[in-house]
Image (tube, rainbow, N blue to C red):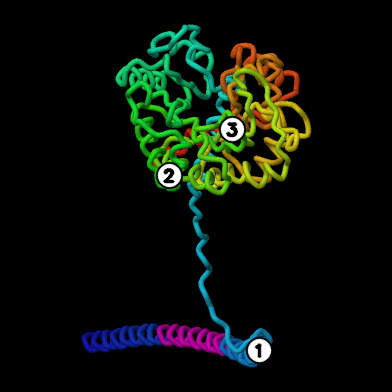
Amino acid sequence: MDSRNEQQQRKREDRKKRRIRNQIIVYIVMAFLILALAAGIVFGVSFLLKGRKDGQQKEQQEAQQSQQQESLPDEQQEKQDMIDGLLADEEEIAVTPEPTPEVVEPTPQERLDEIVNAGIEAMSLEDKVAGLFFVTPEDITGVSAAVQAGEGTRDALAQYAVGGLVYFAKNIQSEQQLREMLENTKQYANYPVFLGVDEEGGTVARIGRAGIGPEVDAAGDIGATGDTQNAYNAGAAIGSALAGLGFNVDFAPVADLANVDGSIMEGRAYGSDAGTAAGFVAAMVRGLEEQNVTACLKHFPGMGSSVQDPHDGLSSSDRTEEQFRSEELSVFQAGIDAGAKMIMVGHMAAPALTGDSEPCIFSRHLVTDILREEMGYDGVIITDALSMSAISEYYGADEAAIMAVLAGCDMLLMPEDFGKAYNGILQAVADGNISEERIDDSLRRIYRIKYADMIEQ
């Protein structure tokens, strides 16, 4: 009995345990389902919200695109209207690239001027003033006859940077001696220096008469041939010989006319007819210049009508202005046109041209107004030797130098007293009677000749 009751009791407990276990399983399943349902609800709500937001953004984009599409035709129309306006007076528009700025190279003359101006700017006033003088080597060294260039020449050029040195027969002993003296002089000079000589041919021939240069006929004899080629050949022969020795300036040719009986230019001039003489003068200028020797026309405005040698005293011409302009000046113009880089002004008085009885070198009207401006000459204008009696008997060395510069002369040849003339110009600048710019103007013309070979090289 008891045994049966126990069995029944165990069965009841087993059923109770199974019921509890099943309830737990049901609870777990229900909890899982509830969680799954909640997650689904959350996901669904989120999906719906995102879809709505995306839809709104899409609607906004479509609205913006629609507005842009609606405004695009208006903008295109405005642009088209603008283009139509630009094309109103033209059939077509050529589109070209922006041009590249052209690089302009300086001309040879511009390069030369740059070199010259830089050199002058670096010079002291003392060197500038000294550069206007063309003197003998004795003038600066103090010796009686310079036949070599040594320490004395070196020291003299260091003190006085003269623009040029002129040599005469007493300076010439032999070809080798002359060449060495000129070469040493160039080496001692702080600036390029003119080395000049009178080599006309005939009796005025320093190297020819010394036996170290070509024997060339006098201008009068060459003119008598009627062939200007002979004048060219003479110039080329003289120029070649001078350049070979070291000279770079020849005080030739004579451009005067021997147009009166007893003319001081008889034999030295190519003749008395201006038309004939002009061709011979131009030919000799070309012959010299082609050998890189500067030709110096002399003696402006022409003193062939005088019978008085300026070495002995002052002379005056009674030629009229018309005669001078139609004859003498035409010969000088031919030489200028042929390329003469230097012109020497004579000491004769020419009242018809200058308006007074003063020597021509002191006439601003003649030197500046006529030669420089009317005749268009931009080369170097040099005085005849200031030591001649025509000047030294009437004017002090300083006075003559100052007057010549004020008239427009660039270089002062052989003053009677170089030191006095040099200091006179310096004092005139200090006093304001001559401006430093006036000195610079002359130096520019001088150094354009001296530095020209730098541009050619």
Estimate how packed mark 2 is, as few (under 14), some (14 to 19) or many (20 or more) residues with alpha carbons within 10 Å: few
What is the three-letter code of the residue carrying label 3? His
Residue at point 44% right, 29% down?
Answer: 199
C-alpha distance separating marks 1 and 3: 76 Å
Q: Which of 123 and 24 is in front in this view?
A: 123
**What residue sits right under mark 3 in the picture?**
299
Dominant secondary-structure state across the stretch colored magenta: helix
C-alpha distance separating marks 2 and 3: 23 Å
How far from the left and from the top, in percent, is residue 96?
52, 75
Q: Can residue 192 be seen in this view?
A: no
Image-quadrant location for residue 366: top right
Q: Which of 373 and 350 is in front in this view?
A: 350
Instruction: Give the structural element (helix, strand or loop) at label 3.
Output: strand
Residue at point 56% right, 89% down?
Answer: 58
Asked if residue 75 is among those painted magenta in the image, a careful observer would answer no
**Residue range of the region highlighted in magenta in the rendering:** 31-55
**What residue sits right under mark 2 in the picture?**
225
Labels 2 and 3: the sequence-earlier one: 2
C-alpha distance separating marks 2 and 1: 81 Å
Q: Is residue 302 visible?
A: yes
Estimate how packed mark 1 is, as few (under 14), some (14 to 19) or many (20 or more) residues with alpha carbons within 10 Å: few
How far from the left and from the top, in percent, is residue 239?
39, 35
How far from the left and from the top, in percent, is residue 373?
68, 43
Labels 2 and 1: the sequence-earlier one: 1
What is the three-letter code of the residue carrying label 1? Asp
What residue occupies the far left of the structure in this picture? 3
How far from the left and from the top, in percent, is residue 32?
40, 84
Q: Which of marks 2 and 3 is in front?
A: 2
Q: Is residue 275 above or below residue 389?
A: below
Instruction: Give the structural element (helix, strand or loop) at label 2.
Output: loop
Residue at point 66% right, 21% down?
Answer: 401
Image mark for residue 84: 1
